[in-house]
Amino acid sequence: MSLTISNNSAVASASYYLDKNQKALQMSIKRLASGKRIVSPNEDPGTLAVTMKLNAAVNRLTGARNNVQNGISFVEVQDGVLETAGRIVGRMAELKGMASQDPMKSSQDVESYNNEFRDLQKQLRDVAKTTFNGVSLFADYAGSKDNVTTTKAKFKGDESADNIIEIFTSSQGSDGSKISLYRSALLSAITISGGSVSSTSIANANESASGVKTYGGGGRSYGLFAAEDGTTISLGQSNLSMAVFEQALSNIAYLRAQTGGGMSRLTFAADSISSMETNLRAAIGRIEDVDIATESANLAKYSILTQASAAMVAQANSTGDVALMLLR
């Protein structure tokens, strides 16, 4: 058997397999460390493109879910303030009853009730200015002032587009589905016609210095809130009957029902978005997540092969030492 040292093919072959096994071992380490089946674009470009699109869709859904959650918070705060307004109007009706229907009350007692009545009107004005993250919860009442017509939200219809808040509920943004929320027309809801107490009597109120509102046709209506300058009406205001308070409470109840409807839609939208987001994440996981058991087996396999290849390279290199021994 001849012994040559000019071309040690055993070393070259062992080195080739050592390099191959080392690369496979490094790939297994990367996959296990990252948890991803694809760690380099050249492995599976098509699948990588699909996962990128799906991840982008998930990110858009996450944004839509945050928008919906903010919308839910908006209507929750709005409903809470409407509840407070209802309790204020209820207390005002109670004061009206105690002041006008109890003959045992002295003028001093009535004046005490009047003071609280006026304070509650100011509180209603303040309540109507409540904001959520800088966004007004309530619209200005419909009407005109100083003979200048203003387009504002009216109670039960004709809402100005300026008083509509749109919540986008899909990954398509403005091109997808959306839910419209209204800044409730609280001030219009508690501006009641004294001559014809009904839900249709809420409209076109001019704010006068006395706090009493007059509107088209020469009729009179009552705003159960203070004027901008703080002026209020008294418990003894003519035609300010209990029916005015009853209608105001009924109108506030309508606004709360409207708010509840919006809250219900937003809640279902949030559930739908969460379900879609969960399903998309599951799809992404099935596509790009590594199989831990399989890859752990590969790690052990290539670790053993790498060690064996390194040993074979060392063994092949020892052939040259045998040739040198013959030269001694």
Image (cartoon, rainbow, N blue to C red):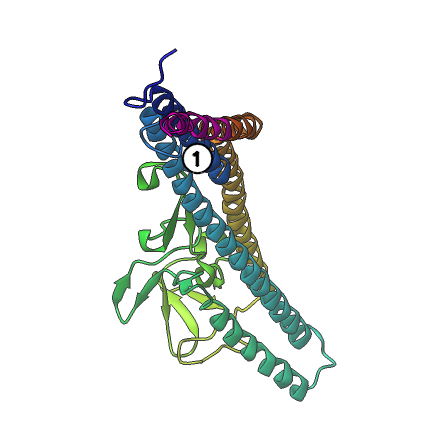
Residue at image point 32% right, 24% down: 46
Main SS of residues in magenta? helix
Which residue position is annotated with label 1?
Answer: 26
Residue at image point 66% right, 69% down: 94
Position of 19 compared to 222: left or right?
Answer: left
* Front one among 324 and 167: 324
* Front one among 214 and 125: 125
Q: Residue furthest right?
A: 104
Position of 242 compared to 13: left or right?
Answer: right
Which residue range is magenta in the image? 307-328
Q: Quadrant of residue 210?
A: bottom left
Question: The N terminus lies in which quarter of the figure?
Answer: top left
Image label count:
1
* Front one among 150 and 69: 69
Residue at image point 37% right, 21% down: 13
Q: Where's residue 107, x and y in %?
A: 65, 87
Q: Residue furthest bottom?
A: 108
